[in-house]
């Protein structure tokens, strides 16, 4: 038996609680996707604990402070679009009260970022994961493009001659 086969067998034999802990410590979304597609058992554990795992992986990938800000920004955008007022009327009492409530909750959650995942719904996290995936891809593409223009790059071609 090869060493990779024995390693895979060992991971599959771990208790579900330990496998859940492994899923929560995955560093980014592409790794999570590969991990849960590689093992039906881990996929089942992911489906049972989807909100918790997705929150943990996004926190690992973005960092806890950035994740909290992204979640609240998404919340604000959603609430402005679906406000009880027909349009974002900043003089509207509902809007003022909502803004004050929002700031109070945000400041409280900013102190205890790790406890926020209990308040989140799956749709919010899925939408944030989709946006993060796109932004991550676009940033990587831009960095590769920008670095190719750097004079120290092997592919650098001067744009003009002096």
Image (cartoon, rainbow, N blue to C red):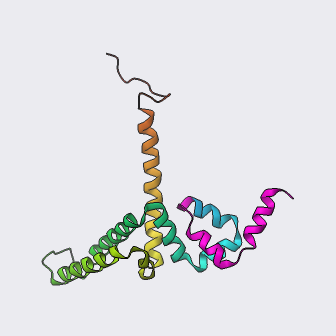
Describe residue 121's horizontal placement relative to residue 28 as left or right: left
For residue 154, above or below residue 98? above
Q: Residue 106 location in percent, x, y? A: 30, 76
Q: Residue furthest front?
A: 111
Q: Residue 37 location in percent, x, y? A: 66, 65
- Residue drawn at point x = 80 percent, y = 57 percent: 3
- Residue drawn at point x = 50 percent, y = 70 percent: 56
For residue 142, above or below residue 108? above
Would residue 85 be visible to someone looking at this image? no
For residue 16, above or below residue 8? below
Quadrant in the picture for residue 14: bottom right
Would residue 75 be visible to someone looking at this image? yes
State how many labels appear.
0
**Residue 87 counted in the magenta span:** no
Specify the quadrant that holds the N terminus: bottom right
Magenta span of residues: 1-30
Q: Residue 85 location in percent, x, y? A: 21, 80
- Residue drawn at point x = 78 percent, y = 67 percent: 9
Specify the quadrant that holds the C terminus: top left
């Amino acid at each position: 038996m090869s060493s990779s086969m024995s390693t895979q067998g060992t991971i599959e034999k771990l208790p579900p609680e330990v496998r859940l802990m492994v899923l929560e410590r995955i560093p980014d979304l592409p790794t999570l996707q590969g991990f849960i597609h590689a093992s039906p058992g881990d996929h089942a554990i992911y489906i049972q604990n989807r909100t918790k795992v997705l929150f943990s992986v996004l926190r690992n990938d973005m960092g806890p402070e950035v994740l909290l800000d992204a979640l609240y920004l998404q919340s604000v955008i959603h609430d402005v679009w679906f406000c009880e007022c027909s349009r974002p009327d900043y003089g509207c009492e509902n809007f003022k009260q909502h803004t004050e409530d929002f700031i109070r909750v945000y400041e409280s959650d900013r102190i205890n970022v790790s406890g926020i995942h209990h308040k989140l719904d799956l749709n919010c996290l899925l939408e944030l994961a989709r946006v993060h995936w796109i932004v991550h891809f676009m940033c990587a593409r831009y960095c590769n493009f920008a670095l190719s223009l750097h004079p120290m790059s092997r592919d650098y071609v001067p744009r003009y001659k002096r």
